[in-house]
Image: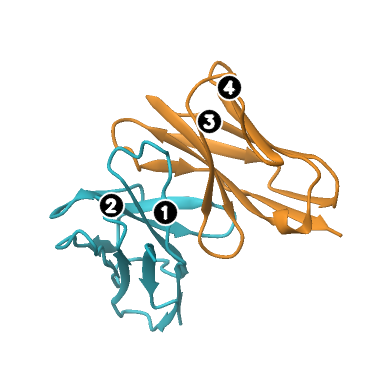
Amino acid sequence: DGGITQSPKYLFRKEGQNVTLSCEQNLNHDAMYWYRQDPGQGLRLIYYSQIVNDFQKGDIAEGYSVSREKKESFPLTVTSAQKNPTAFYLCASSTRQMNTGELFFGEGSRLTVL
Amino acid sequence: EDKVVQSPLSLVVHEGDTVTLNCSYEVTNFRSLLWYKQEKKAPTFLFMLTSSGIEKKSGRLSSILDKKELFSILNITATQTGDSAVYLCAVGSGTSYGKLTFGQGTILTVHP
């Protein structure tokens, strides 16, 4: 079945460690996104990519990094520079034109910093 | 800075009630307004609205956009316990199609 797979679903890390969250899609979508969700704040855009080998910062990119070497994959690294990394992270994809308006979301990765 | 505000933040009703969820926005270069339902983890798409006054309907759910007053409402009639979820409103603006600004979400709880 087509969809978006995020891994791991749950992740614990110690302060000062980098961690990479995986996002893979087999929908043949050009565009991919990373959102962060905190209680009471909705979803906030971290990074997005509309084409392979190109990506742009979203509203809260500080302390995060991404790469887009393949159309199917858009991994997110949460670096030690991110001051408050404990959150729920959602990856999404869409066609570049997004004619139907639909973002397809993965199941999310919950990161807890100890 | 683009801004999307949803109200109420939470709502508790009984099965059979009708609810109205609100979404107001302030964005430059408005493109579209979208509603999503988030039950556990992955939000699922409900509606996309681009034109004022045209109601979109899917079963017991309907939504309408007012571009003059900068708001949208999502109506759910004859609510069921399966409607319990977080409802997210998002606005697309500018030239980057998937770059959405989300509201805080409305937590809807439907009791039997």
Mark number for residue A29? Answer: 2
Asked if the residue under mark 1 is in contact with the one under mark 2, i.e. CB atoms within 8 Å, the reply is yes
The x and y percentages for residue B13 are 83, 50
Residue that numbered label 1 is attached to: A104
Q: Nearer the viewer, residue A84 or A26?
A: A26
Query: Marks 1/3: CA distance?
Result: 23 Å
Q: Nearer the viewer, mark 4 or mark 3?
A: 4
Position of residue A98 in the picture relative to residue B58 (left or right): left
Mark number for residue B25? Answer: 3
Mark number for residue A40? Answer: none
The x and y percentages for residue A7 are 37, 75
The x and y percentages for residue B112 are 87, 60
* Quarter of the image where the N terminus of chain B is located: top left
Q: Secondary structure at mark 4?
A: loop
- Amino acid type assigned to the residue bearing label 4 in the image: Ile
- Amino acid type assigned to the residue bearing label 1 in the image: Phe
Q: Nearer the viewer, residue A79 or B93?
A: B93
Position of residue A73 in the picture relative to residue A21 (left or right): left
Query: Marks 2/1: CA distance?
Result: 10 Å
Please state the chain letter of the residue tagged with numbered disc 2 in the rendered image.
Answer: A
- Amino acid type assigned to the residue bearing label 3 in the image: Tyr
Query: Marks 4/2: CA distance?
Result: 29 Å
